[in-house]
Image: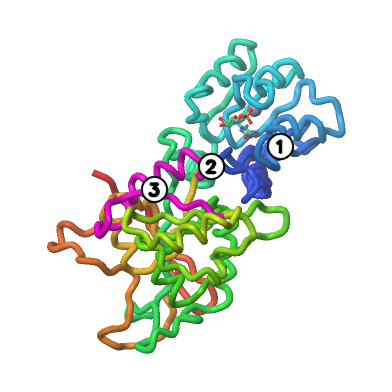
């Protein structure tokens, strides 16, 4: 029973996808005499926390009931007053928490407040699921660096385009729909200039009510054409370049209100990607979906900036020695140098297979 209520809390928490960043996804379910009498989730950034929404939605007096929350109730005065105080004041008998809050402002203090008030608190139910749901928040709140997901779509023989450069589409409809859901989840979408020149992607993907992802284009010399779709909304575009940029293009780009040019790196040496990621983090961008091309993917990997890899594989063969693969660059010289993934999961999308995992560190 307990587990079912926490599952429900996790399920409803995902309704905030794309609207709460850089805050966590949180769900809460209130149970009295074995029945759900209230539910709530964190709906948008800066809005009421899940616990508050659950209490507000309750159809009966919550006194003496149990609340299942996917994240430890907060203990601090932020944009809203502390939820732990609210739960105490409302007379909850028991609080079941999936995971403690890694936010240094909370980090166990919420549980402490509740226990001191004599409320039974159980921590750790479906903890792994809750941590996975908030993998972005967990990294960002502790490091202020964005959680970077490198996503690729390739054939069985590892090609991301034909020998003529055709790439629409390698994978099927189901895979592409899922990618749109991930695009909705993250705060930024990053590509290299090669991809912009080859495909002219619009790099949008918002579902209704979501907030627009920031488009991030790595373009060391500002070769981006003024007509590129990615420059023309919705939302912002950040173009990262080096001191070797094209002066005329810089002036033209400066005219566009929604475009920010970040100069980071010496001429001829490529954009300083570590600096770029820190800049994105400082701007509140908690997550980035890296969508190629192969040179940028390699540089991001080589700089140790990728956290998660998602590779969709379509059951097709394209061949071609020169055809592109997900990761280019110089490559690692030895097998021992390979980037290795942890916690690997395999999921089918139509005829395609998604293999995903987390980059092993150290
Ligand atoms: C949320 N939603 O449902 C819970 C959160 O600035 P504030 O007041 O919104 O506080 C944000 C912090 O509150 C967040 O980093 C997390 O530590 C804690 N819990 N946050 O946005 C919620 N329960
Ligand atoms: Zn709270």
Q: Please provide percent x and percent y for residue 168.
A: 50, 81
Q: Nearer the viewer, mark 1 or mark 3?
A: 3
- Compared with 8, 89 (above or below) is above
The structure residue drawn at horizontal position 60% and vertical position 42%, both measured from the top left corner, is 25
- Residue 150 on image: x %, y %: 40, 60
Quadrant of res 323: bottom left
In the picture, measured across the screen, residue 177 lies left or right of residue 239, that is right
Q: CA distance from mark 2 to mark 1?
A: 14 Å
Residue lying furthest left? 334
Ligand 1 quadrant? top right
Q: Which mark is residue 29?
A: 1
Residue 59 is a magenta residue: no
Q: Earlier in the sequence, mark 1 or mark 3?
A: 1
Of circles 3 and 2, which is in front? 3
Q: Which residues are magenta?
A: 259-285
Give the Cα separation between the discs numbered 1 and 3: 40 Å
> Answer yes or no: do the residues labelled 3 and 2 have beta carbons within 8 Å?
no
The disc label shown at residue 142, or none: none
Question: Which residue occupies 40% across, 42% down?
Answer: 278
Q: Position of residue 96 (x, y in %)?
A: 61, 30
Cβ of mark 1 under 8 A from ligand 1: no
In the rendering, which numbered label is found on residue 276?
Answer: 3
Residue at 70% x, 16% y is: 88
Going from N to C along the chain, the mark reached first, 2 or 1, is 1
């Amino acid at each position: 029973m307990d587990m079912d209520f926490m599952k429900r809390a996790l399920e409803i928490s995902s309704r905030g996808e794309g609207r709460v960043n850089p805050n966590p996804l949180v769900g809460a379910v209130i149970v009295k005499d074995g029945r759900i009498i209230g539910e709530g989730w964190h709906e948008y950034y800066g809005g009421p926390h899940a616990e508050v929404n659950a209490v507000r939605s309750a159809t009966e007096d919550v006194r003496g009931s149990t609340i299942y929350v996917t994240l430890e109730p907060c203990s601090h005065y932020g944009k809203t007053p502390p939820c732990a105080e609210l739960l105490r004041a409302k007379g909850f008998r028991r609080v079941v928490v999936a995971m403690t809050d890694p936010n240094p402002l909370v980090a166990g203090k919420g549980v402490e407040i509740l226990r001191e008030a004599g409320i039974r608190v159980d921590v750790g139910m479906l903890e792994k699921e809750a941590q996975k749901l908030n993998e972005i928040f967990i990294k960002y709140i502790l490091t202020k660096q964005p959680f970077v997901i490198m996503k690729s779509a390739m054939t069985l023989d590892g090609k991301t385009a034909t020998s003529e450069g055709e790439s629409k589409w390698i994978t099927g409809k189901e895979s592409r729909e899922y990618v749109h859901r991930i695009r909705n989840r993250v705060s930024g979408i990053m590509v290299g200039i090669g991809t912009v020149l080859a495909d002219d992607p619009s790099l949008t993907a918002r579902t209704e009510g979501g907030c627009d992802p920031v488009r991030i284009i790595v373009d060391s010399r500002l070769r981006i054409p003024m007509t590129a779709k990615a420059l023309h909304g919705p939302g912002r575009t950040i173009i990262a370049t080096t001191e070797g940029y094209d002066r005329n293009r810089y002036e033209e780009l400066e005219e566009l209100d929604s475009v920010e040019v970040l100069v980071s790196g010496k001429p001829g040496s490529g954009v300083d990607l570590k600096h770029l990621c820190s800049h994105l983090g400082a701007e509140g961008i908690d997550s980035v979906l890296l969508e190629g091309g192969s040179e940028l993917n390699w540089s991001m990997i080589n700089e140790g900036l990728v956290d998660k890899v998602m590779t969709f594989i379509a059951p097709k063969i394209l061949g071609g020695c020169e055809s592109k693969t997900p990761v280019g660059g110089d490559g690692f010289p030895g097998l021992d140098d390979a980037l290795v993934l942890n916690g690997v999961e395999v999921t089918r999308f139509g005829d395609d297979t998604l293999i995903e995992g987390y980059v092993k560190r150290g």
